[in-house]
Image (tube, rainbow, N blue to C red):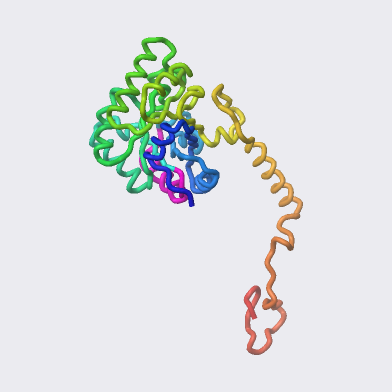
Amino acid sequence: MQPKVTVNTLRKMKQAGEKIAMLTAYDTAFARIFDAAGVDMLLVGDSLGMVIQGEQSTLPVTMEQMVYHCRAVSRSARRAHVVGDMPFMSYQASCEEAVKNAGRLVAEGGAESIKLEGGVEFAETVERIVRAGIPVMGHIGLTPQSVHKMGGYVIQGRDEQKARKLLADAQALQEAGAYAMVLEGIPLELAREITRELSIPTIGIGAGPHSDGQVLVCYDALGMNPDFQPKFLKRYAELFQVITSAAQQYLGEVKAGEFPDEAHSFRSNTMRLVRDDEEPEEGKGPVYGVPV
């Protein structure tokens, strides 16, 4: 078995110029598949609110739900590093609440680090969580938990003033002890500059090719929702079509009485059925379906 990916592994990968591959995962099945494929990091993202629960944003996701999904993923991640997302209002109210909830993702959920959104304003929060012994991944740029503040899912940092703010956010989070940084929805030039400035790995999504690694929501990468087609997304499979076809084939075979057939049924050489008008042999008193 390959060695477990840790925060030290990721730091060495940046230093060596080796790209980092991260995907989201929300359950044991996908975690097992991605881990076997060699994916470096599995993010149990609060994106589950949208892709699993059908919500319009990530905001309704709770701590209990995040702990549940982290536990499911961590059970199957033999090599990949598991990151648990801090959901909305699990860390914004106070540093004390943030440390407590981060601890839950690690102790109860089995996460090996946590991720939270925000810049300079959350530097102290990051520092306190790191001080408690929990690695923290930052997340700046397009931060979905601030969707209402941003006025929607819009690209961030396109003018010089906003770009400078994001660079300052990245530097503040690094100084606070963050071990890595997600850069979401920012121009590729800005992502390149931030990546050059930081000594910790950057993980891009909708941020161009110059980050130290990339992350995609697994359901998006696998083509589970044909209606979701943002510019940054590349699909590596079309599972909506594959699964729909499989379900239709199953439906047809059940309706036609073709499934299950004898090949998919059980037989027993020690089974005898007794009719209502038939007396069982002496000493063999079973009735329908009972072994004799």
Q: Residue at x 28, y 23 (%)?
A: 121
* Residue 135 or residue 252, whichever sits in front: 135
Q: Residue at x 36, y 38 (%)?
A: 114
Residue at the top extreme of this rendering: 160
Q: Which region shows up in magenta?
A: 60-80
Give how far across and how far down residue 131 sits, in percent.
24, 37
Q: Residue at x 71, y 77 (%)?
A: 275
Residue 139 is covered by the magenta coloring:
no
Task: Place residue 225 in its image quadrant.
Answer: top right
Query: Quick check: 71 above or below 270?
Result: above
Which quadrant does the C terminus fall into?
bottom right
* Residue 66 or residue 182, whichever sits in front: 182
Q: Is residue 205 left or right of residue 228?
A: left
Task: Place residue 212 in its image quadrant.
Answer: top left
* Residue 16 or residue 211, whichever sits in front: 16
Give how far across and how far down residue 69 sits, in percent.
43, 44
Residue 78 is covered by the magenta coloring:
yes
Give how far across and how far down residue 53 sits, in percent.
48, 37
Q: Is residue 78 left or right of residue 264?
A: left
Query: Quick check: 114 above or below 265?
Result: above
Q: How many marks?
A: 0
Give how far across and how far down residue 25 sits, in percent.
48, 41
Q: Is residue 135 left or right of residue 241?
A: left
* Residue 132 or residue 101, whichever sits in front: 132
